[in-house]
Amino acid sequence: MSIGSFIKKQFIDILQWTEDTDGVLAWRYPMEDMEIQYGGSLTVRESQMAVFVNEGKIADVFGPGMYKLTTQTLPVLTYLKNWDKLFESPFKSDVYFFSTRLQIGRKWGTPQPITIRDADFGMVRLRAFGLYSYKVADAAKFYSEISGTRAEYTRDEVEEQLRNLLIATMTNALGASSLPFLDMAANQALMSQTIRERLAPEFERYGVALDNFAVTNVSLPEELQKAIDTRISMGMMGDMAKYTQYQVASSIPLAAQNEGGVAGLGASLAAGAVMGQAMAGGLAGAAGAPGVPAPAVPPAAPQAAAADDPTARLQKLKELLDKSLITQAEFDSAKAEILKKLVG
């Protein structure tokens, strides 16, 4: 081995990390059997920290900057090694670099549904998904609690631990919440803030700062979601009797275009009116005292009903039009007037 190779192998003048591999949060400088030159330089770039470890004990921690390695800049290491002030020889120490860059756009989700007690639906199983961002804030604590003496520690490895912590904290937060699911889903910003406040101290225990946490989706099992959709649809319909009348009235012009269509529509119109009254009565009964039937609607007099029957009037108009006793314009005008009265 040449003298040059021997010197290169034995002494290190510059300690630095260029972060040439994405996703690495902690990296140990490859010392092998080399020693650090007394008076050598340590370069810690922006968004980095460096930690000197002596025989398993954390010594000095450095933030961004360039440092000359002497007993003055390594006070803790000097104390651990019992150096005197005249020490000027190469020394051994493990050096770890940590990336403190913000890790953004990290995804989280519940692998299994979380069971919670809901004020509206009782016991429900929900799933949630979202994004979060974090960074290494305390290199010494991160080294002690998570990364340890590994040659490198990646983002994927730490996120596996953080994700378990996140799901556990989120389950406790949702389980203790008194907010119904519908209010929770409608205000995801408040939900995100509540969970973030619970997560931040848990992350801090490991030297990690939680920068942002967002819930982007909360979903229920398909069968419960269908039940909610049905309830929303019922609310949007409003007065069921008027809704049924409107549906029937909308079908009359189409039936009038077909021969015999208006006559055949009579039965459907009557059935629709009865259905609308029954549904309206049912909703009114549900809103009142249980077990009390809705008051019966007295039937209209047969002659009066026949005189006011829009189906009979439309049929009569169609017969007059077919016999050329009235014009198409007169038929359309009279038909529109009848439909207008019917719909109200």
Image (tube, rainbow, N blue to C red):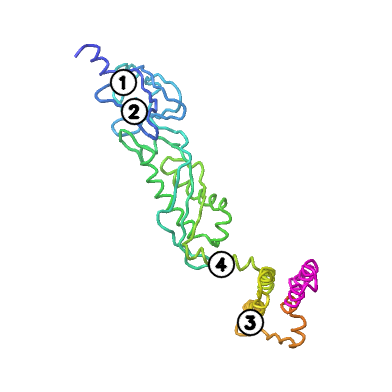
* Helix, strand or loop under label 4: helix
Q: Which residue is mark 4?
A: 230
Q: Position of residue 211 (x, y in %)?
A: 50, 41
**Highlighted range, magenta:** 315-344
* Helix, strand or loop under label 3: loop
Q: Which residue is mark 2?
A: 95
Q: Is residue 338 magenta?
A: yes
Of the two numbered discs 2 and 4 on the same chain, state the one appearing first in sequence.
2
Q: Residue at x 66, y 68 (%)?
A: 254
Q: Is residue 207 magenta?
A: no
Q: Position of residue 141 (x, y in %)?
A: 39, 38
Q: Amino acid at mark 3?
A: Ala
The residue at the far front in this view is 323
Marks 2/4: CA distance? 63 Å
User: Could you say which disc has been placed on residue 36 in the image?
Assistant: 1
Query: Which tag is nearer the camera, tag 2 or tag 4?
Result: 4
Q: Residue at x 54, y 53 (%)?
A: 191
Crowdedness of circle 2 by 10 Å Cα count: few (<14), some, many (20+)? many
Of the two numbered discs 1 and 2 on the same chain, state the one appearing first in sequence.
1
Q: Which residue is mark 3?
A: 289
Above or below, 337 against 171 in this view is: below
* Labelled pair 1, 2 in contact (Cβ < 8 Å): yes
Asked whether the viewer can see residue 63, the reply is yes
Q: Which of the 4 image quarters holds residue 238? A: bottom right
Q: Which of the 4 image quarters holds residue 84? A: top left
Asked whether the viewer can see residue 239, the reply is no
Query: Which tag is nearer the camera, tag 3 or tag 2?
Result: 3
